[in-house]
Amino acid sequence: MSRHLQTNISDKQKQEILFQMTELALLESASLISSLGHNQVKFTVDLIGLKNKHELDSLFNPEHPDMFAVCHQIDGPCSGHIVFLLEEKSALLFTKAVLDKQDQMLKLSEMEEEALLEIGNIIVNNFLSNYVQILDESINTAVPVLKQRHYVQLVDELNSEPVDKEFYIVKFAVEIATCNCFAHILWFDHFCQIDRESTGLHKIVCMQE
């Protein structure tokens, strides 16, 4: 059964839908990622909202600017990019915890980079598949790519819009073994325009039950 959420539903309801869909996507992702190794993964939504390029320093830590990012290009009506990213050190600790590796290497090995790419792919695909349920549109993605960049360089590379153009952001806590950090999902496209004042969707959405 499906139900259509009309544009006249309350802003609070719209925000709750976004939050619930994100929570579900991260819950499914944590279960799949936990099955890759011996440690349980927990993701907890911290923030859903909008940022622009001027606000990057408030989103990330300028003292630790280098990031690992799993980047998906989206084709079709919702064209753009969606990215899963972690600070460089957090990516190292998180990936080694998932793989249950105890070595003290300060860089990701080729195998660990492949594992991080798969982890990011799981998270982004679950994120998109849950959002497809509230969209009356299809989403197609290209093969994901792992990038290592300063966060400003990364955003400039993936988002050619003006500096004041906002993009969709999810910030979530990551817990696994002794690793506790934050990760992010950034979505640069034409769909995820949540009004800063109303925090509501600018279209009718459809949610599958």
Image (cartoon, helix red, strand yellow):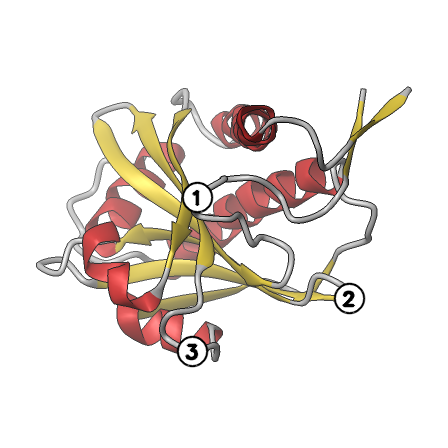
The residue labelled by disc 3 is 162
Callout 1 crowding tier (Cα within 10 Å): few <14, some 14–19, many ≥20: few
Q: Is residue 140 left or right of residue 32?
A: right
- Indicate the position of residue 124 as horizontal and vertical percent values: 57, 47
- The image shows residue 61, relative to residue 125, as above or below, that is below
Residue at position x 58%, y 52% from top?
Answer: 192
Q: Is residue 100 visible?
A: no
Q: Is residue 47 left or right of residue 138?
A: left
Callout 3 secondary element = loop
Furthest residue in direction right, as rendered: 1
Residue at position x 57%, y 49% from top?
Answer: 121
Q: CA distance from mark 1 to mark 3?
A: 20 Å
The label shown at residue 76 is: 2
Residue at position x 42%, y 23% from top?
Answer: 38
Amino acid type of the residue tagged 1 in the rendering: Glu
Q: Select label 1 or label 3 by which is in front.
A: 1
Dividing the picture into quarters, in which one does residue 80 lie?
A: bottom right
Q: Is residue 135 left or right of residue 102?
A: right
The residue labelled by disc 1 is 197
Q: Nearer the viewer, residue 106 or 51?
A: 51
The earlier-in-sequence mark between 2 and 1 is 2
The earlier-in-sequence mark between 1 and 3 is 3
The earlier-in-sequence mark between 3 and 2 is 2
Furthest residue in direction front, as rendered: 8
Callout 2 secondary element = loop
**Quadrant into which the N terminus falls:** top right
Amino acid type of the residue tagged 2 in the rendering: Gly
